[in-house]
Amino acid sequence: MSEPVEAPAPAEAPGTVRRRPPPGRRREQILQCLAGMLEEAPAERVTTAALAARLQVSEAALYRHFASKAQMFEALIEFIESSLFGLIAQIEAQQPSGLLQAARMVQALLVFAERNPGLNRVLIGDALVGEHARLRERVLRLFARFEASVRQSLKVAQQQGAVGTGFDPAERARWMLTYASGSLALRARGDGRVAAGGDEAALRALLG
């Protein structure tokens, strides 16, 4: 998703039949371009006119692949969700410790956001200002699902005897989500004090 959109092909000789990219490839190009524009201009709202101009196509061409800009954002959210929960499934399969599972889930989210600044703007919601309310609701559901995954791992840690008495998995999962949300916002602002690799100590304190 973060790879650049391919440059336009050189001018063709007269009489040459121009081939359109396959529909799936064109959809991917549109989403890559949208994510790239979100990253390049963090304080600006991306319009379909600007997106079409960047891709050197008409707005009507965009709407052949997506019914609306909201649908484009929905596709970005689906990509985020698929990527993030794919990583979570790997963590659950490879790491037997519930505590380490929970910590690595948060780290995976933060690393993903750091590597995909445009998509991080979708996660923190500033790219969705002025867009359809259902998009923000969709992101809230994504975070609710993420919190549930962390909570389940903390329940495993409790069953493993890895935490003390009085440890509340639901409360700790909420703390970890709050920490992650704040870290995502700091990354979006370009705060140089944060880095995905520096979260380990904070997560240990939250889980202690």
Image (tube, rainbow, N blue to C red):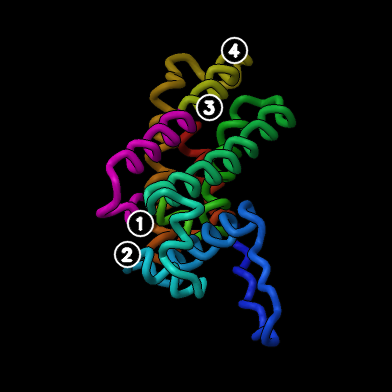
The answer for how far apart the CA atoms under marks 3 and 1 are is 25 Å
Secondary structure found at label 2: loop
Task: Find the distance from the CA under tag 1 to the CA under tag 2.
Answer: 7 Å
Q: Residues within 10 Å of mark 4 (few under 14, many from 20)?
A: few
Location of residue 158 by image quarter? top right
Q: Which residue is mark 4?
A: 159
Q: Quadrant of residue 115?
A: bottom right
Secondary structure under tag 3 reads helix
Indicate the quadrant where residue 87 lies. Answer: top right
SS of the residue at dot 4? helix
The amino acid pointed to by label 1 is Ala
Q: Which residue position holds label 2?
A: 45
Which stretch did the figure color magenta? 123-147
Amino acid on which disc 3 is placed: Ser
Ranked by sequence position, the earlier of labels 4 and 1 is: 1
- Foreground of the two, 48 or 98: 48
Tell me the distance, in whole angstroms, between the alpha carbons under discs 4 and 1.
40 Å
Earlier along the polypeptide chain: callout 3 or callout 1?
Answer: 1
Measuring from the top left, give residue 127's x and y in whole percent.
35, 56
Tell which tag, 3 or 1, sits nearer the viewer.
1
Q: Is residue 127 above or below residue 190?
A: above
Q: Is residue 123 visible?
A: no
Q: What's the CA distance linking mark 3 and mark 2? A: 32 Å
Q: Is residue 165 above or below residue 70?
A: above
- Image coordinates of residue 84 in percent, x first then y, are 57, 41
User: Does the magenta run of residues contain 139?
Assistant: yes
- In the picture, the disc for residue 127 is 1
